[in-house]
Image (cartoon, rainbow, N blue to C red):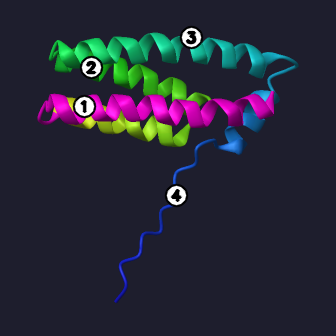
Amino acid sequence: MSHESTEKPLLVLNHETVAGLKNLGEGVLAELFLEFVAIFQKQSKELKALVTQKDPEEVLRVAHCLKGSCWAMGGEKLAATCQEIENRAADAFEEGVLKALVEQLDVEFEELCPELKREL
């Protein structure tokens, strides 16, 4: 018996989410994109510092906030990585693993931004 996953693969950008944001009105997506970039850059930097400081509660809090922003903008892979950071911070705080995950966030952010820009 096959145990293939029935889950859909995570998307860099969920276009249905973006379509919903576009329906909010002219220019709203562009404003949200600029705000998202600013939030991501701030919180990504903050996460790096918190991992180095070995502060699991704050890592969890910031990763959770960032996850919400990513989901809201349609960044499924980015949100899933934030979830993984939350899980690792709550479980066994492994600094090396968390640092790698935060670096992965930056890579995924660089994948997401061009796709979002094309939607503006």
Distance between mark 2 and mark 4 Cα atoms: 26 Å
Q: Quadrant of residue 56?
A: top left
Residue visible at 41% across and 76% down in the picture: 4
> Of the residues tagged 3 and 4, which is closer to the observer?
3
Amino acid type, label 1: Leu
Distance between mark 3 and mark 4 Cα atoms: 27 Å
Magenta stretch: give its range. Answer: 91-120
Q: Position of residue 49 (x, y in %)?
A: 27, 12
Q: Residues within 10 Å of mark 4 (few under 14, many from 20)?
A: few
The answer to whether residue 74 of the structure is visible from this angle is no
Characterize the magenta stretch by its predominant secondary structure.
Answer: helix
The answer to whether residue 106 of the structure is visible from this angle is yes
Upstream in sequence: badge 1 or badge 2: 2
State which quarter of the image contains the N terminus. Answer: bottom left
Residue found at the very far bottom of the displayed protein: 1
Q: Which mark is residue 98?
A: 1
**Vertically, is 31 above or below 98?**
above
Q: Which residue is mark 2?
A: 59
Q: Position of residue 67 (x, y in %)?
A: 44, 28
Q: Which residue is mark 3?
A: 38
Upstream in sequence: badge 2 or badge 4: 4
Are discs 1 and 2 less than 8 Å apart at CB? yes
Q: Position of residue 101 (x, y in %)?
A: 32, 35
